[in-house]
Image (cartoon, grey):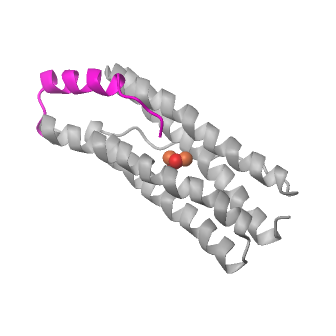
């Protein structure tokens, strides 16, 4: 059974994953409005992935005799000024989320809650994929010319990104 402190930190993670889904959703809408249909496609799909992460934590809390909390969500971020900022902010978000996952695993270790420690390992691995996914977008944008990328290379990049797999 979950301790109160583990239940609380997991519930914070439920909200974080729900907020992540909102962030990707709002950036997807922004990208679509800017004409980046490919980025929008990837981010809409990724928003669904974040919701799956949220569900995974909720199910675990319930399974372990805790009570999952469904909390209010933060306001979505402001629209980015360009693709560069969009990817940078998204990357920062993923790094913050990795820190939050490490806190869960740390606490689980401290409390010798090996079930939660083991559960947390799935997310540790997942965060590697999440960060890689966004770093890869930043790399591609850099090759295209970064903030000085021409419309042509941005169009090409966008169509590539739209077809990208997202199992992260
Ligand atoms: Fe749920 O991994 Fe991204 O935030």
Residue at position x 29%, y 43% in the image: 136
Q: Is residue 71 visible?
A: no
Image coordinates for residue 27, horizontal then vertical, percent: 43, 34
Q: Is residue 152 magenta?
A: yes
How many numbered marks, from 0 up? 0
Task: State the image coordinates of residue 35 (x, y, percent, origin top left).
Answer: 31, 19
The answer to which quarter of the image holds residue 150 is top left
Residue at position x 62%, y 44% in the image = 53
With 95 as the anchor, is 47 left or right in this view? right
Q: Main secondary structure of the magenta part?
A: helix
Residue at 48 percent of width and 37 percent of height: 24
Magenta region: which residues? Answer: 148-168
On the rendered structure, is 103 left or right of 110?
Answer: left
Within the image, what quadrant is residue 110 found in? bottom right
Assign the N terminus to one quadrant of the image: bottom right
Q: In which quadrant of the rendered view does residue 108 lie?
A: bottom right
Q: Is residue 61 magenta?
A: no
Residue 76 location in percent, x, y?
Answer: 53, 42
> Which of 168/48 is in front?
168
Q: Is residue 140 left or right of residue 68?
A: left
- Can residue 66 be seen here? The reply is yes
Relative to 149, say whether 124 is above or below: below
Q: Which residue is located at x 35 percent, y 23 percent?
A: 162
Farthest residue, direction bottom: 110
Q: Nearer the viewer, residue 126 or 55?
A: 126
| Residue 74 horizontal side relative to residue 78, left or right | right
Q: Position of residue 69 (x, y in %)?
A: 79, 51
């Amino acid at each position: 059974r979950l301790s109160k402190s583990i239940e609380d930190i997991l519930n914070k993670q439920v909200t974080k994953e729900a907020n992540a889904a909102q962030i990707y959703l709002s950036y997807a809408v922004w990208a679509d409005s800017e004409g980046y249909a490919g980025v929008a496609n990837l981010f809409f799909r990724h928003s669904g992935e974040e919701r799956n992460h949220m569900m995974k934590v909720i199910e675990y809390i319930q399974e372990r005799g805790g009570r999952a909390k469904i909390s209010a969500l933060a306001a979505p971020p402001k629209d980015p000024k360009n693709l560069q900022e969009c990817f940078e902010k998204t990357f920062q978000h993923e790094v913050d989320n990795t820190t939050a996952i490490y806190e869960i695993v740390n606490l689980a270790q401290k409390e010798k809650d090996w079930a939660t420690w083991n559960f947390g390992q799935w997310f540790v691995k997942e965060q590697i994929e999440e960060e890689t996914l966004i770093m890869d977008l930043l790399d591609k944008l850099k090759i295209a010319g970064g903030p000085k990328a021409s419309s042509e290379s941005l169009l090409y990049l966008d169509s590539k990104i739209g077809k990208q797999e997202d199992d992260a």
